[in-house]
Image (cartoon, rainbow, N blue to C red):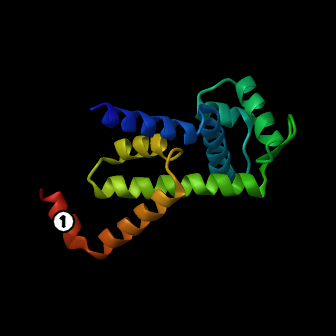
Amino acid sequence: MKNKNSKRLDSIKAAHKSKKTQSSTRMEDYLEIISELVDLKGYATTLDISRYMNVSAPSVTKMLQRLDENGFLEYEKYHGINLTSKGTQTADGIRQKHGILLEFFEILGVGYETANQDAEGIEHHLNSKTIKQLRKFITFLKANPKVIDNFKNL
């Protein structure tokens, strides 16, 4: 009994050791929002970001400065916000994870709103190997629509 509990505790400890911090998850959210805004409007403003992130403009400014310091974007106060290639790559990766998770949840029959909410919560925490396998599984399911139909009729 003691050995079983010890293994479980060790696995929890290991998961938390490699887990992304709340801060890096938040940074990814900002990069994702900025990327979406640039795609939609051609630019992103501090005010737009604060609206979509539900935070104050000064909080956005602080985060933009951190993202700039970490090489994710180029930020000059009262000027444009430009993602660097590192920032674009990170944002694209998050968007891709979100899309894969959304598609998987929709195959499961989860409604769009719930699927989107869950994808948003999970996208930052999955290993790239897991996403790769999930993408392969989705491709398999789509190539075998009877499997999806059988599942939906359970």
Position of 17 with respect to 116 (left or right) is right
Front-lying residue, 117 or 38: 117
Indicate the quadrant where residue 65 lies: top right
- For image coordinates 86% across by 35% down, the residue present is 78
Front-lying residue, 36 or 124: 124
Neighbourhood count class around disc 1 (C-alpha, 10 Å): few under 14, some 14–19, many 20 upward: few
In the rendered image, the vertical position of residue 150 relative to residue 66, given as above or below: below
- x and y percentages locating residue 49 in the rendered image: 67, 36
Can residue 81 be seen in this snapshot? no
> In this figure, what is the number of numbered marks?
1
Indicate the quadrant where residue 136 lies: bottom left
Dot 1 corresponds to which residue? 149
- For image coordinates 37% across by 43% down, the residue present is 113
The N terminus lies in which quarter of the figure?
top left
Position of 29 with respect to 98 (left or right) is right
Front-lying residue, 94 or 10: 10
In the rendered image, the vertical position of residue 139 relative to residue 153, given as above or below: below
Q: Amino acid at mark 1?
A: Asp
- x and y percentages locating residue 15 in the rendered image: 49, 40
Front-lying residue, 41 or 103: 103
Can residue 118 be seen in this snapshot? yes
- x and y percentages locating residue 129 in the rendered image: 50, 60
In the rendered image, the vertical position of residue 117 relative to residue 151, given as above or below: above
The C terminus lies in which quarter of the figure?
bottom left
Position of 99 with respect to 52 (left or right) is left
| Residue found farthest to the bottom | 143
